[in-house]
Image (cartoon, coloured by chain):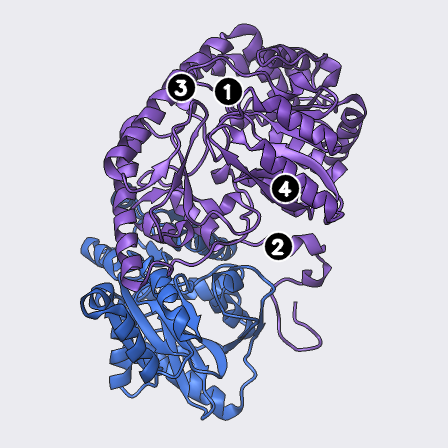
Chain colours: A purple, B blue
């Protein structure tokens, strides 16, 4: 490992061999702090982990046993690169709930929708290409985009989601600058981390603008069926089958441990996705696909989603009422579904600098900087209410309120701008999903 | 030999501790020891009570509770033999300004420093205190939490305007700040093994960092080039080795320690930091020093455990 030139060592004999894109992949102080978040003493309002305790685990155990005993020779074997056909048939039914008409042949099953994100980025992005995304945007997508050396340009959202006029202005500017925009990445329902939903009225507007500029839409929809009060809005894909690649997932509506998601894409794109997926993983986990197929065949999965919605609504209410009571000086949205509250900190606080203090106080959140490609977001934090019980959420907010008070005191002592600017994107870890 | 390694904990350095624990476990197992890893939680005391006769505990916790003497006090209370410094001495070594004051009094050189709690800045006005600091110390200065490791919360400040931000960063990790003259020179870490008259040094490791030797530099290979042994003259080597042994002796450290220092332009060894539970990860300095000294890690760790047991 010792360098012949200097006689020293950098502890990695392959340092000069890495691709340029690997240089940004570094373990950060933030990642280290999250190591504590998994301990039971810590109330983690950080991760987007679904409430698995709400599933009928005994029944699922029996289901898994039967799959291995009765279908083991299939379940434990390689499968099709595009995915298990009976599952693809089910996925078509699932998507119909959001107005999508598709054929099982249109569906590509992936290892979570995270792999679908990677595949789409791999087949479309050359280094330096532009991806337009909401501000803020899902940290896991930003990590994929960075790994493929894309440039991400953010477009503002408001309470009705992506702002069409801002999208149009951004695309016009990028066109005038001669930049190549490959796609718009959007989470239209119960946005991660923003919590907002793209209004019905804006959906055709966004699609129309993208069509005019020749920009593909990548619709990422893990939370669409997790609305608290209303029926799902029609998916963008249902309005523009040729202009939209749709990503779906069982991670939030069933269980992320199976790692099963999917993509639905225009025909030619789908062909490339299958080839890209086969070259990456040969085929998605056959055992997981059979498990999900059995679950959809034999369990009241829609009833389970309804239960989840009730549980998440209760947790959302617990978080919002605790925030109103204990951190009234902050502001936040009240999401109608999904997992997240996007909270704006009181003036002068920096979400990233405050994190060690929060970890000391045994509460964890995700700093807003993780959700931007360009260092914004230091004034926000993402709080997840999906996993802790309402009592733990209340306790977590109580701890967070203490942290905010202490940090405000420090910032007041040293001057309002002492918290400083943000940082660049974090590489996603399962904590941040 | 049965060894129970304590790793994890709830400090900001949990991740580093877990990685250190796994490395030491592997090394000890390679020489035939039976090793278990344990976190610090409500199962700890029953586990300690069931440690087999002739077993020893090795606390590899970094940061509070592992290095501040409290875990050591618990082990002493239970009468469990353990590797490393005893509780009283750990408590002194853990608080940087206290350790620095003790060392200074004993004639060990350490950069000039002041220590203030956040309340002092509030009571007398932060701006005036920071101005006084900038007048007294030629910038750059190092701002660091009075307790803690892995360079968490540490900033090197070259510009007076940057001081408030560095203070906010520091106070997020703890309520007492140490502001220390940043000394230029050759940065070295000297590891010590043994106790009292039996203490001996391992070869000094030199650290050449591009930019600050911060968390990123420490735990991502690439930004730092290490030289083991350090590229020192015989006189410099004697100075840093003498300083490390003196720190180990003056602070009453046991079994192993790592002393971080700078060899300044006058050839003095200026002590920056003392670690009673030095990092043992794949990028850490203590294992590098051992390897540079031609020592096999498993054998060395086993010897450390045996000496602790024989106490």
Do tags 3 and 2 sit on the same chain?
A: yes
- Asked if A338 appears above or below B148 in the picture, the reply is above
Determine crowd level at label 1: few under 14, some 14-19, many 20+ residues with C-alpha closer than 10 A: many
Residue A54's tag is 3
Which residue position holds label 2?
A24
Q: CA distance from mark 4 to mark 1?
A: 23 Å
Q: What is the C-alpha distance between the residues marked 4 and 3?
A: 31 Å
Residue at image point 33% right, 83% down: B135
Q: Give coordinates of residue A150: x percent, y percent.
A: 68, 46
Query: Element type at marker 4?
Result: helix
Label 3 to label 2, Cα distance in Å? 38 Å
Which residue position holds label 4?
A144
Point out residue B221 in the picture as x, y percentages from the top left corner: 58, 62
Mark 4 or 3: the one toward you: 4
Task: Find out whether the residues at labels 2 and 4 contact each other: C-beta distance under 8 Å.
Answer: no
Please determine if labels 4 and 1 lie on a single subunit: yes
Residue in view at x 37 percent, y 70 percent: B163
Task: Say which of A124 and A311 sits in front.
Answer: A124
Q: CA distance from mark 2 to mark 1?
A: 33 Å
């Amino acid at each position: 490992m010792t360098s012949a030139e200097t006689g020293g060592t950098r502890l990695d004999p392959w340092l000069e061999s890495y691709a340029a894109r690997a240089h940004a992949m570094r373990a950060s102080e933030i990642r280290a702090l999250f190591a504590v978040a998994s301990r039971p003493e810590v109330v983690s309002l950080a991760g987007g982990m679904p409430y698995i305790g709400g599933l009928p685990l005994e029944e699922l155990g029996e289901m898994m046993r039967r799959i291995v005993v009765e279908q083991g020779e299939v379940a434990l074997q390689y499968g099709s690169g595009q995915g298990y056909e009976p599952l693809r048939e089910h996925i078509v039914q699932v998507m119909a709930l959001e107005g999508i008409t598709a054929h099982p042949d249109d569906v590509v099953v992936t290892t979570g929708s995270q792999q679908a994100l990677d595949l789409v980025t791999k087949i479309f992005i050359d280094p330096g290409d532009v991806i337009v995304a909401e501000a803020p945007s899902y940290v896991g997508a930003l990590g994929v985009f960075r790994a493929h050396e894309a440039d991400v340009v953010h477009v503002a959202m408001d309470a009705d989601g992506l702002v069409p006029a801002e999208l149009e202005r951004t695309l016009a500017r990028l066109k005038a600058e001669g930049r190549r925009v490959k796609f718009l990445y959007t989470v239209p329902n119960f946005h991660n981390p923003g919590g907002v939903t793209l209004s019905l009225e804006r959906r055709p507007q966004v699609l129309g603008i993208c069509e005019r500029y020749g920009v593909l839409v990548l619709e990422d929809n893990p939370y669409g069926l997790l609305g608290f009060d209303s029926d799902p809005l029609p998916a963008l894909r249902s309005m523009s089958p040729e202009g939209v690649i749709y990503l779906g997932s069982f991670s939030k509506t069933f269980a992320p441990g199976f790692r099963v998601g999917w993509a639905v894409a225009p025909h030619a794109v789908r062909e490339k996705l299958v080839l890209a997926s086969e070259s990456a993983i040969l085929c998605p986990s056959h055992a997981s696909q059979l498990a999900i197929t059995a679950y959809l065949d034999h369990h009241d999965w829609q009833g389970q989603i309804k239960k989840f919605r009730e549980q998440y609504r209760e947790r959302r209410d617990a978080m919002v009422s605790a925030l109103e009571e204990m951190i009234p000086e902050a502001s936040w949205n009240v999401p109608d579904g999904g997992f997240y509250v996007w909270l704006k900190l009181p003036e002068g606080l920096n979400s990233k600098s405050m994190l060690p203090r929060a970890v000391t106080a045994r509460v964890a959140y995700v700093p807003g900087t993780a959700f931007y490609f360009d260092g914004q977001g230091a004034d926000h934090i993402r709080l997840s209410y999906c996993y802790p019980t309402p009592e733990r959420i209340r306790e977590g907010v109580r701890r967070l309120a203490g942290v905010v008070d202490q940090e405000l005191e420090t910032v007041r002592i040293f001057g309002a701008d002492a918290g400083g600017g943000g940082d660049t994107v974090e590489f996603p870890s399962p904590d941040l999903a | 030999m049965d060894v129970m390694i304590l790793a994890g904990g709830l400090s900001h350095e949990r991740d580093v501790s877990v990685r250190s624990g796994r490395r030491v476990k592997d090394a000890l197992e390679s020489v035939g020891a039976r090793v278990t890893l344990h976190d610090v939680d409500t199962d700890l005391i029953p586990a300690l009570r069931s440690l087999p006769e002739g077993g020893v505990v090795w606390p590899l916790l970094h940061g509070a509770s592992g290095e501040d003497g409290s875990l050591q006090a618990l082990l002493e209370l239970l009468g469990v033999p353990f590797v490393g410094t005893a509780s009283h001495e750990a408590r002194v070594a853990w608080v940087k300004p206290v350790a620095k004051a003790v060392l200074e009094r004993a004639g060990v050189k350490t950069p000039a420093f002041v220590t203030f709690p956040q309340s002092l800045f509030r009571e007398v006005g932060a701006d005036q205190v920071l101005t006084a600091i900038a007048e007294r110390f030629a910038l750059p200065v190092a701002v660091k939490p009075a307790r803690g490791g892995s360079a968490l919360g540490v900033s090197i400040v070259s510009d007076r305007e940057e001081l408030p931000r560095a203070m906010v960063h520091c106070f997020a990790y703890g309520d007492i700040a140490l502001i220390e003259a940043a000394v230029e020179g050759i940065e070295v870490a000297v590891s010590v093994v043994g106790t009292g008259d039996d203490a001996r040094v391992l070869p000094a490791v030199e650290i050449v960092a591009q930019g600050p030797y911060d968390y990123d530099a420490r735990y991502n290979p690439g930004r730092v080039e290490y030289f083991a042994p350090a590229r020192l003259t015989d006189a410099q080597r004697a100075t840093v080795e003498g300083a490390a042994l003196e720190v180990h002796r003056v602070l009453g450290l046991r079994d192993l320690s790592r002393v971080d220092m700078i060899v300044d332009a006058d050839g003095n060894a200026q002590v920056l930091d003392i670690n009673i539970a030095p990092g043992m990860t794949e990028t850490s300095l203590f294992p590098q020093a051992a390897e540079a000294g031609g020592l096999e890690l498993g054998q060395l760790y086993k010897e450390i455990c045996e000496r602790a047991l024989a106490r």
